[in-house]
Image: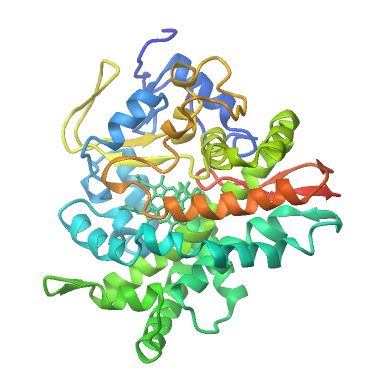
Amino acid sequence: MNGQAHASHPTDEPLFNPFAEGFTDDPYPHYAVLRERAPVYEHPLGFWVLSRHEEVSELLRSGNSVEEHNAAPGPMRDVIAGSYGDRAPRMNGMSILDLDPPAHTRLRRLVAKAFTPRAIEALRPRIRELVDELMEPVIGAGEVDLVRTVAFPLPFAVISEMMGMPRVDVARLRDLTGTLVRSLEPVADPEMLEAIVAADDEVMRMIADIIAWKRRNRGDDLLTALIDAEEDGDSLSDDELVAQVALLFIAGHETTVNLIGGGALALLRHPGQLARLRAEPDLLPTAVEELLRYDSPVQSSRRITVRPHRAAGVEIPEGAFVMAALASANRDERQWGEDADRVRLDRPNPHRHVSFGAGVHHCLGASLARVEAQIALEKLVTRTGDLALTGEVEWNGRINLRGPAHLPVAVR
Ligand code: HEM
């Protein structure tokens, strides 16, 4: 079956097991096996996995569904529905990430109004200031954890400022969103499920309070813009507003931390490329695209087929839950050549990566994430004389929003 599109027999030992020991530290060898042996893989649990660039890109652009109730009855539906029962996190289901057109089109248009490329460009100077504040103490500090000192706090500070957040218990909110973000990936542990449901409750209450405060304390910020977002007499209802704010807040920081941390790590592991970037900082925009490709901050996305879907000659039935392995597509030798597993700043087409998805759900925050990563990595490579890893990298243990949890680095 080598190289053939392949649906496994349900009793086969799974070729893909994201709960396997070591998977979250290094999933790439697992993806390579899938691409080679079963690029269209039917998992014994009843879901499908696409792992090559062509089929992943096609699926994302295919107009299939993101609404989980469209999944046909079967083991995967039971996993989705059975795990949360009727207590599914409210962000899931009501945010644009979980809605199909026309509901998606309507809400995305309203949210995007408050999220224009011009507004993001205008943030550059302030992001530079925030990066300076976070990085100055790091430069010359000897040994630091780059995730704790820079990669994590920067996106959190940026999205909080953009929103025009009141003074809230930031540590508590960070903790809660760190738990809630796990609802974007499969959860096997019942205690984690309980924690997610509880975190969802508390985050939704906190966000509703923040919105109520903002209605009394309007400003030139994203929250006020979302409250005001209106087109042809249409605006966001209270529940819709809370779900979009929760999504923006979580997507706004839990992903970019992985790009900055994972990107810095990739450069540290490719010292020749790091030296080149130091010498030619104009390469930064391209470098960020290559780093997005090399280690996807969001490893996968999913669709539910609303009609039979053909991929590499295999027919996936209607109602199937299909995982698009973005991280695997980004390492597909067929798309990138034999050195797909290496960082190469002069790669001709890194922007063909699918790290921000594709089609109608293409990431709304892509330009913001790019600006943050460009500024943070520019400062890191141009303002330090020497950078070296000093210890083991600890990964965050997540299957989907995967990145380093700690990055111990000597900075001189
Ligand atoms: C959607 C990745 C940063 C807001 C997506 C999707 C991906 C993604 C893959 C599509 C999911 C799908 O097709 O089902 C990333 C990565 C980021 C990042 C890798 C950082 C490196 C951000 C930021 C924000 C943001 C900073 C906002 C402040 C959103 C929103 C959606 C989305 C609102 C939903 C769009 C829709 O469904 O129409 N992101 N994202 N993201 N992202 Fe991002």
Q: At 30% from the left edge and 64% from the top edge, which residue is drawn?
A: 111
Outermost top residue: 1
**Which colour assignment does the render follow?**
rainbow
Residue 205 in the image: state x and y as whole percent: 42, 79
349 lies above or below 254: above
Q: At 45% from the left edge and 79% from the top edge, which residue is drawn?
A: 206
Quadrant placement of the N terminus: top left
Q: 130 or 106, which is in the foreground?
A: 130
Total numbered badges shown on the rendered structure: 0
Left or right, residue 392 beside residue 239: right
Q: At 62% from the left edge and 25% from the top edge, which residue is drawn?
A: 342
**Camera sees residue 153:** no
Outermost left residue: 232
Residue 56 in the image: state x and y as whole percent: 35, 30
Residue 400 in the image: state x and y as whole percent: 50, 44
Left or right, residue 6 beside residue 319: right
Q: Which quadrant holds residue 135?
A: bottom right
Q: At 18% from the left edge and 60% from the top edge, which residue is drawn?
A: 106
Residue 371 in the image: state x and y as whole percent: 52, 53
Q: Which quadrant holds residue 351?
A: top left
**Camera sees residue 133:** yes
232 lies above or below 104: below
Q: 377 or 312, which is in the foreground?
A: 377
Left or right, residue 360 beside residue 380: left
Outermost bottom residue: 216
Q: 341 or 175, which is in the foreground?
A: 341
